[in-house]
């Protein structure tokens, strides 16, 4: 074999090896992106290095594989659904305490599913493997909860916290704790407190959702979560109403 042919063969072999290595890396990257969704981009941004971020995400997968996770029984699902409805009832009279109760309830659910609840950051890392799409809700709720403890969260902040907690709660529960909610009702109506709507109270359809636009699923999910949280009770809600004088 001539030296020229030998060199050509070596180059071809190196190109093939490089293509295989590239394909393997690309496959692993695609799998990580599929598994972690928005958490993949967040990890890359946090580390500033794609290789280091992917190493961290693979480590999360290894830790997650060692966990003994378990689904909830129908009885546990029903109990948690009832507990969540009580949180929403509590929000009407005491939004601050309701957010604290929601945080405790979510933590209890995380524990019962088999996740360690030692450190908050570790908890996020463990949850990111199977619940990446709702993890930002947990971060937002946790941040508002901290501000609530410091006395710097507004009533609207607290309502949003409950919306965020509910998103992760439903994801971990495996079912929506207040199904069928698709409208914002008054604070004192049964449909507001339970998150359901009667058949004779239709609402105008969301044009993007009805048309099946690119954000239809996200819009519907966010709208459902947001509309299921009742408004807190105000002083005006407790004032008596006087019937108009019709004797004249």
Image (cartoon, rainbow, N blue to C red):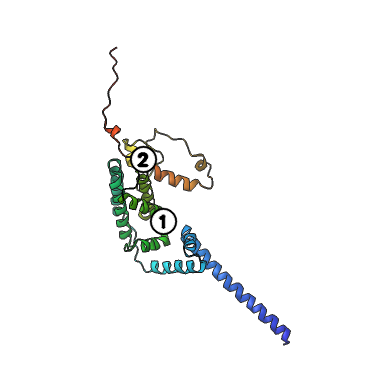
Relative height, residue 159 to residue 41 (above, below) = above
Give the image location of residue 117, x and y in percent: 32, 62
- Residue 218 placement, left or right of 14: left
Q: Quadrant of the N terminus?
A: bottom right
Give the residue at mark 1: 135
Query: Does the rendering let one see residue 78?
Result: no
Q: Are marks 2 and 1 in contact (CB under 8 Å)?
A: no
Number of numbered discs on residues: 2
Q: Residue at x 27, y 30 (%)?
A: 239
Residue 96 position in % (x across, y down): 30, 46
Q: Secondary structure at mark 2?
A: loop
> As displayed, is residue 87 above or below residue 21?
above
Element carrying mark 1: helix
Distance of label 2 from label 1 (alpha carbons): 26 Å
Which residue is at the front of the view, 133 or 68? 133
Label 2 neighbour load within 10 Å: few <14, some 14-19, many 20+: some
Whichever of callouts 2 and 1 sits on the residue coming sooner in the sequence is 1
Dot 2 corresponds to which residue? 196
Q: Residue at x 33, y 53 (%)?
A: 146
């Amino acid at each position: 074999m001539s030296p020229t042919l030998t060199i050509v063969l070596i180059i071809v072999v190196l190109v093939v090896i490089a293509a295989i290595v590239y394909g393997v890396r690309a496959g692993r990257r695609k799998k990580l992106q599929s598994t972690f969704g928005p958490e993949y981009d967040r990890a890359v941004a946090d580390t500033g290095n794609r290789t280091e971020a992917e190493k961290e995400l693979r480590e999360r997968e290894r830790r997650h594989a060692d966990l003994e996770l378990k689904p909830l029984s129908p009885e546990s699902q029903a109990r948690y659904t009832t507990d969540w409805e009580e949180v929403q009832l509590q929000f009407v009279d005491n939004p601050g305490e309701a957010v604290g109760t929601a945080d405790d309830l979510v933590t209890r659910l995380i524990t019962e599913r088999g996740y360690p609840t030692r450190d908050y950051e570790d908890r996020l890392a463990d949850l990111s493997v199977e619940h990446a799409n709702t993890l930002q809700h947990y971060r937002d709720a946790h941040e508002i909860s901290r501000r609530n403890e410091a006395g710097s969260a507004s009533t609207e902040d607290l309502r949003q916290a409950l919306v965020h907690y509910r998103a992760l709660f439903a994801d971990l529960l495996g079912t929506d704790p207040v199904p069928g909610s698709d409208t914002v009702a008054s604070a004192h109506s049964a449909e507001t407190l339970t998150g359901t709507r009667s058949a004779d109270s239709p609402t105008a359809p969301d044009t993007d959702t009805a048309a099946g636009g690119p954000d239809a699923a996200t819009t519907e999910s966010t709208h459902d979560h947001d509309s299921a949280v009742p408004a807190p009770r105000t002083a005006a809600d407790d004032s008596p109403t006087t019937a108009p004088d019709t004797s004249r």
